Image (cartoon, rainbow, N blue to C red):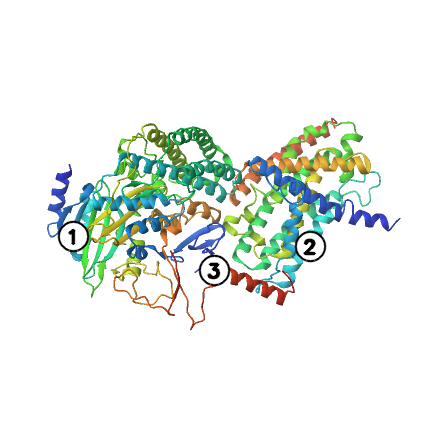
Amino acid sequence: MTDDFEARLKEAFPGSTVTTGSKGRLWVSMAPEGLIAAVDTLRERFLIRQLAVIVGEDLRDALQVNYVFTGDRVIVLQVRIDRDKPEIPSLALRIPGAMVYERELKDLLGIMPVGHPDLRRQAIPEDWPEGVYPLRKDVQIPRPGEETAQEGV
Amino acid sequence: MEKSVFRIPIGPQHPFLKEPVKFDFDIRGEEIVGARMNLGYNHRGIEKACEQRNYYQCMYLLERVCGICSHSHTSAFVQAVEEIMNLEVPKRGLYLRMVNGELERLHSHLLWLGVAAHEVGFESLFMLVWRDRELIMDILEKISGNRVNYAINTIGGVRRDLTDAQRKEILGILKTVRQRLDYYAKIGTNEPSFVGRIKGVGTLSAERAAEMCAVGPFARASNVATDVRKDDPYACYAEMDFQLITHDSCDVLGRVIVRVLEMIESCKIIEQLLETLPEGEIALAKVSRRVPEGVAVSRYEAPRGEDVHFVRGNGTDKPERVRVRAPTMANLEVATESVIGSYVADIPIAIASIDPCYSCTDRMAIVLRDPKRGTEVTTWEQLRRRGIEWYSKNKGIRF
Amino acid sequence: MDVVKPLLYILVYPGLLFQLVFSTFLEWMDRKFYARMQNRRGPLHTGYAGLLQPVADILKLFFKEDIVPARADRFMFSLMPILGLAAVVTAGLYLPVWLVTPYNSFEGDLIVVLYLLSLPSLVLFLAGWFSVSPYSLIGATRVLTQLFAYEVPFFLALLTPAVVAGSWQIRTIAVYPWTSGAWWVIVIQVLAFLVALLTLQAKLERTPFDIPEAETEVVGGPLTEYTGKKLALFRIQKDILMMVGSAFIAALFLGGFPGGLWIGGLWLIVKTSFVVFLLSVIRASFARLRIDQIVTFSWKYLAPASLIQLLAVLILKGNGVI
């Protein structure tokens, strides 16, 4: 069934590259515009409904969002987005479970989920400065004083 | 807000949960009509911190993500790293990892059962369950040297072997534990006042659970058959004979039953593991400190549900990105929602029924010293001295 | 002598001093029983086998900071602990201990005692009400809801021995099994005795009826805002209420405390301890009931049970058996 599955997946996502990783994980790279349609296909045609996590990454030259779906197979949708226009379509209305991860994405990496119903701050405190995203590689966290007393680890 | 509705805040400090999360419940009389949750009181920045440490340091750091399921987080992490490095872990190492993992599940579920009993005011069950949890904690201490944060995993295997005497002793203790578990299964499902408090409380339909991507015993109690050990077996779970426990009552009673039965399954798994423990090395002799470029998603069935770790290596000895998804993160939102419509008295047990763990969910805090604003870090000693001064000045009390 | 005796009565036995000492002893006993039933040790270190632990706990509270919330009604907030304590101590004065020379016993003192025993719940309600905190308010409304649930069965249950003895005087009811020679009346009242035990548990707000102060939901319930001395007074009040309530149940259902000052005193201690032991067993074997479950339970089971008991006693009485 494995190879068949892969072939079907390739057929379903013509504009994207599908690679097979270890343990049969499938990695699908695609453009942000195709995301919503891809998620719908995944859920309806392949019956993979469970969104495990959304991982935002800073690849230095671009940002990347990985949507890890689990079911019979683990499928990771990878969406590369521009650093200058960090926006992705929100999945929150389709998959309510995506809400918390997208809020974290916005807080920690500054990737704006467009169409998200509830964008309160989640991971960072209320007095955190606007526009500082701790998980970006080039981040300069503004320190009020000069020395850091204690790193909360 | 209507006039007859009033809002009670629960948290970030409240006796029902000694952890930093805030809920706002709108109540009318005793009925809950609205609920909101707010996180982020204690985000510890572990993901960022991991990027600045090497893989071995990361392992110990990730062990501290959670105090209860510490083994789960390291296991998930080392699995991902081993996957990127393409390592073949010795079988004995994997078996020992699983023994630890299942013992951890036992102690976590026992802890939860005690907490659940406490939330509905059944103190006797709470005390008895926690007494028996000590048996498991003693085993864990014997084989790893620690009660929590066992530090037994390493990249390519485990760090401590099990002697034959220990093996026999554990099997002996497990017999006692199984007897006690049977007793708790009986109490948990038959004691009228306890069942009266948990039956039909915090209901969550199977459809909603799937929609909200709920995981672990919480989802299984809503009849969603999800268990990484079965769906996507890691380590040697494919060789084990155990059942995936589900229940269709969709309420807290179901969650109690699922957890108690799961503990019995865990005992079975440990017995199988120890009886067929293969001989050989427990870890690879030499593992490179540099991890090649690559990315891996690792799934692990922690006691509370599925742990997902996403690791990207970049050819150096430090990871490029580590993402930790603890099970509470997936369950909290839907648990908050499931409270609406029930009584105020059901809040603690309904929320606690996902076995929430906010240290897993929130992960960052940096304490800064700011001379300009006058904020500073107060040490315990300073605080004590300040208290003594205040009392001697204002109340004339001498210490 | 006319002055000394009432003073002794009010201040020493069975008044304030005796009540303080005996109630702390009972609290220790309750905690010890409770702990043993949960496979724990209970208090161990303060005094012999931890006997002084309740005293130490209360003393500690007296030295703690006394805070009145800014928005609370200062006068009422401070008055409540004293009022509650006064009510239970006064109720304790009606214990039928000095059988030879009943000091303040009169026909109808049972009604007075029932009234005085209801006061602590009202006081608790008002204490929560005047603290103006969401937790206190929820706790306070729960106190009142629960009061309506258990009060009627409690009254009906205590009415049974009064009907049997044909008197409203506690002393007469207590000695009735001995004076009439019909000691077996104790046996036929067992249903009322059980109802009285459960409702006393509800009055004391202990598991399974501790929803008004369920710490996992409403922190301390009506007492959330109380600290220091005032909280200590509430603690004493609760202890004495447990002692007085148990002693009255012992007096009305278990044949009183015959034998004068010394032997009667001994009986008082033994029988009250027995009732407290039963209360601890109840506390250890149930989970906390929800407020709606308490109301249903009271009206569905406790009230009918006490009515049936009353009816049975009335029929027996009418036929001249008793």
Bin the neighbour count of mark 2 within 10 Å (Cα to Cα): few under 14, some 14-19, many 20 and up.
some
Per the model, the C-alpha gap separating discs 1 and 3 is 52 Å
* Residue C295 found in image quarter: top right
Q: Which chain is mark 1 on?
A: A
Per the model, the C-alpha gap separating discs 3 and 2 is 33 Å
Residue drawn at (40%, 47%), measured in percent from left and top? B67
Kind of element beneath mark 2: helix
Q: Is residue C199 visible?
A: no
Q: Nearer the viewer, residue B291 or A94?
A: B291
Residue indicated by mark 3 = B3
Asked whether the beta carbons under mark 1 and mark 3 sit within 8 Å of each other, the answer is: no
Kind of element beneath mark 3: loop
Bin the neighbour count of mark 3 within 10 Å (Cα to Cα): few under 14, some 14-19, many 20 and up.
few
Which disc number belongs to residue C83?
Answer: 2
Q: Which chain is mark 2 on?
A: C
Q: Amino acid at mark 1?
A: Ser
Query: Does C119 appear above or below B260?
Result: below
Residue indicated by mark 1 = A29
Q: Using residue B379 as the reference point, say whether residue A125 is left or right of it.
A: left
Query: Does B216 appear above or below B274?
Result: below
Which disc number belongs to residue A147?
Answer: none
Q: Nearer the viewer, residue C17 or C255?
A: C17
Nearer the camera: disc 2 or disc 1: 1
Asked whether the beta carbons under mark 2 and mark 1 sit within 8 Å of each other, the answer is: no
Q: Amino acid at mark 3?
A: Lys
Q: Residue furthest bottom?
A: B372
Residue A74, image x, y percentages: 22, 44
Per the model, the C-alpha gap separating discs 2 and 1 is 74 Å
